[in-house]
Image: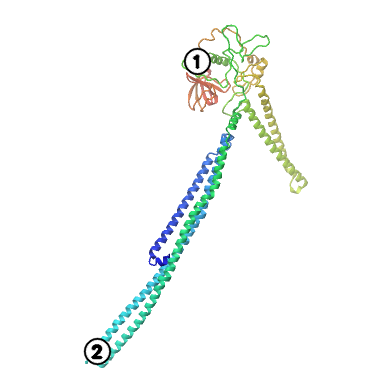
Amino acid sequence: MSWGAELWDQFDNLEKHTQWGIDVLEKYIKFVKERTEIEINYAKQLRNLSKKYQPKKNSKEEDEYKYSSCKAFLATLNEMNDYAGQHEVISENMTSQITTELARYVQELKQERKSHFHDGRKAQQHIETCWKQLESSKRRFERDCKEADRAQQYFEKMDADINVTKADVEKARQQAQLRQQMAEDSRAEYSSTLQKFNHEQHEHYHTHIPNIFQKIQEMEERRIVRVGDSMKTFAEVDRQVIPIIGKCLDEITRAAESINQKNDSQLVIEAFKSGFEPPGDVDFEDFTQPIKRTVSESSLSNSKDGKPESRFTSKSKGKLWPFIKKNKSPKQQKEPLSHRFNEFMTSKPKIHCFRSLKRGGAGPEDFSNLPPEQRRKKLQQKVDELNKDIQKEMDQRDALTKMKDVYIKNPQMGDAASVDHKLAELGQNLEKLRLEAQKFEGWLAEVEGRLPARTEQTRRQSGMYEPQNTLTVNNCAQDRESPDGSYTEEPNQESEMKVPATDFDDEFDDEEPLPTIGTCKALYTFEGQNEGTISVTEGEMLYVIEEDKGDGWTRIRRNEDEEGYVPTSYVEVFLEKNAKGAMTYI
């Protein structure tokens, strides 16, 4: 099966077919090139996606990645980076092994094709030239034969004519002989040219053209094989990265399997545990007898005279922490206990055995704005950081000391006095860090010393608990929080909060809801998940029924059915002038 034997007369069609083959190859090159662009764009989009969801440095998101689910998600993002890298490898390998190689091969193929068809055209031109020479020799032989025949006829005619002179006859005879000789010469030349043409034609169709067409056939077959090899490479490039992509997916699976819901739950406890005890039971206070008062668990008793003296009446009961939510129905228009408590709280100092949670703004240096457990963690973290800084400074000091010793032993290496200033500076820094560490360690020891003691008896979460005597109340008063977040000590007579016994005939009269003392605008959205709080949305306008008493919470009302507490820092309060002057809390 040879193109030279079978397609000896299809030179033009072979030329078109081979050009079509090159076009197909260029089309495949374009296809692979577009595939590499898709792969590189896909890898870029995957990297951007991974980068978009990476936790930002020095942000709150970094703290979230201590949970196993977030760690698994971070591992997934990292593996997606590696996954994107494999698609970049696919693009690079296809470019180097297919696109570049085929582009170079196409140029070589075009040159080879051009050379083969140039030889074919040259052979065709040669055979056409031989044919023209044969035709020319043939026409000349034909013409000479005709001329010789006419000359012979003219001689015979002159020879038969008795009126023609002998000289004319001789001239005609010589002319006939000359034409006859020319015809013979043309015949010999034509015969020679014919033999040459037949030889050239035989060589052309049986040797030259078959050889040229065979080379073209081999060239086309090599092109077809090269396309097949490129397609195999195309698949192999993908197959080479499959194991690595599989490893990436396996790592994602292992990260997902490493999620531990129990550990995450424990981390939530460690992150948000306040260290306070849940509120104890509220005792029943019997008001059926006008004089006798039942001493509640949260009241203060006079241990000296042995008489039970009511320290807290219904108007002086402490707030619950978290606050008990008061969502009244239209039928519930009374709040006998909380209303009296609010009246008492506005006229009596509040005792806090813990420091309230204030949100927003920079907290105090000793983290006293946090609950005990959270405060302990923050202080411990600060102590660890200071110890690391101290160790770092000590390492630098030791290194400089060694350098100074080397300078003393080898003065040519440097001046020993040049490091004295740096050593002095490091000594000052170490002293400052040690003092700072001692300060935080003192606060930490204070917190760690208090935490066990606070579990000895049941207390209210708001910090109001049952003291054993007046001394306990005075100690607790030292931890009292003022509205600006600092701690103040109330006078002893106020810290005891003695309420004289009076008649309570009108204690149970129906009381109207607390009047509004102003309005407020929610600066942020707050999800009131604890009992006693209320949810607000940013920009919402509400009514203020009780201002911040220094504990960081403001009591608001949405309507007559919904009221509760929100952090003061989450709202902008506008008090009415007739209440406490025009005051604004931001």
The dot on residue 158 is 2
Between residue 430 and residue 295, name the one nearer to us: 295
Residue type of the residue flagged with mark 1: Pro
From the image, tell me which residue sits under label 1. 513
Name the spot of residue 216 as percent of width and height, x first.
44, 64
Placement of the C terminus among the 4 image quadrants: top right
Upstream in sequence: badge 2 or badge 1: 2
- What residue do we see at 77% from left, 45% from top? 408
The picture quadrant where one finds residue 61 is top right
Name the spot of residue 456 as percent of width and height, x first.
66, 20
The picture quadrant where one finds residue 342 is top right
Color encoding of the figure: rainbow
Q: Is residue 169 above or below residue 407?
A: below
Toward the left, the furthest residue is 163
The dot on residue 327 is none
Residue type of the residue flagged with mark 2: Met
Q: Is residue 154 above or below residue 438?
A: below
Residue 226 visible to an observer of this rendering: yes
Measure how far apart labels 2 and 1 are at the Cα level.
Answer: 162 Å
Between residue 192 and residue 417, name the one nearer to us: 192
Name the spot of residue 71 as percent of width and height, x first.
57, 37
Residue 367 visible to an observer of this rendering: no
- The local crowd at label 1, few if under 14, some if 14 to 19, many if 20 or more residues have their Cα within 10 Å, is some
Toward the bottom, the furthest residue is 166
Q: Which structural element holds mark 1?
A: loop
